[in-house]
Amino acid sequence: MFSSGVIAASFVDPVIDTVQFTCGSDALIKTTAIGFSPSNLFTMGSISTGTFVIGSGRVIDVTDGGSNTGGGATQLSDDFTSNTGANRFTLAFFSKNAGALPAATAENYFNKVVVTNITDSDITTHAFSDFTAGGVSTLNNDSRIIFQKNIDLGWSVNDVIKLEFRSD
Amino acid sequence: MSYSFLLNREYTTAEFDRLFNDCLDSLKDSLNGTDESIKSFLQKSYKNMQTISTVEDGTLIAIIAVSINDGRVKYNYAMFGKDANNSRAYIYGDAWLNGMHSFLNDNGITREKTYIGKSTKMINYHNNVHNSHSWITTTNDVDNFDDAEWSSNDY
């Protein structure tokens, strides 16, 4: 004999947030970047999803060019440089007027990021642990941190890219 | 001599290779790596950037890779090849400089900027040319880049 019951389950959406942009390009000295940034130094691409959040819940700014930080702004890009010949996946997060960004942990940012090149129908996944984190830089209540991974993503100008930041 | 300045003119592999070989000495002064890695780097960069080309009497003699935003051009990389006189001195001449300025005006570009590695041939060029055309070359470490100087016009 069976008794009816309810199986209680909790579900937490593992998707922290998504951001989508169209790639542009810019260069600085010996490095070329392809992707999105509103920076006064690296100005490239256009974003279609507006602000997004990281694991801690902090809102990441996508419009300020780094007016208080010497051009340090959000940057989501595929970089290559003649300095070392290296290709890099760069994720620079910029927080506007909210104080220092949290420490560089997977809980505070993302456990993995799923990169979809919609134009090329290409999907890759990158673990937080594969990135090298820079220090949190805070100036005039604006804050920025940069994560980089050595890899050639193969992005081109006008590619449409979606980044899905996940906690699982 | 007659120069034409063209935005995003397509170029052949042979044209790119000729310009690259003509100015490899200057490129190696500003970029790191082997001849082949510099060439590969520039091919990928140029492919993804806007360009301003100079054509002299039907022959491509220069391509500058640029970023253009809101009436501002940022000069990223330049390949100045040899002209009909087997010389690259044209970039100092009034004919080329005035033609370039006219091209910028015609395209609504009123501001220019470039970042240049310190102690390179290109910074000497900017110092020589831009001082005579009211550019400002800043030699301190502005914008948090300690390995570059920058020049600007109307900045």
Image (cartoon, coloured by chain):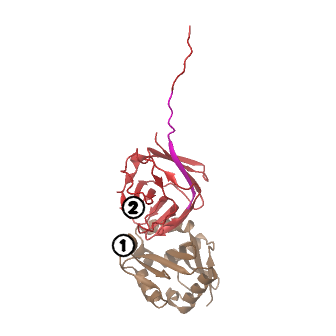
Chain colours: A red, B brown
The boundaries of the magenta stretch are A9-23
Amino acid, disc 2: Asn
Decide if residue B39 is in sight here: no
Number of residues whose C-alpha sits closer than 10 Å to that of mark 2, classed few (under 14), some (14–19) or many (20 or more)? some
Let me know if marks 2 and 1 both belong to one chain: no
Residue at the top extreme of this rendering: A1
- Residue B70 x %, y %: 58, 73
Residue at (57, 91) in percent of width and height:
B95
Label placed on residue A141: 2
Q: Nearer the viewer, residue B3 or A137?
A: A137
Q: Does the magenta stretch include residue A74?
A: no
User: On what subunit does the disc labeled 2 rest?
Assistant: A
- Residue B95's place in the image compared with B137, above or below, is below
- Residue B75 x %, y %: 51, 76
Decide if residue B139 is in sight here: yes
Identify the residue under disc 1. Answer: B147
Q: In the visual, does A116 lie left or right of A138?
A: right
Report helix, strand or loop for mark 1.
loop
- Residue A96's place in the image compared with B124, above or below, is above
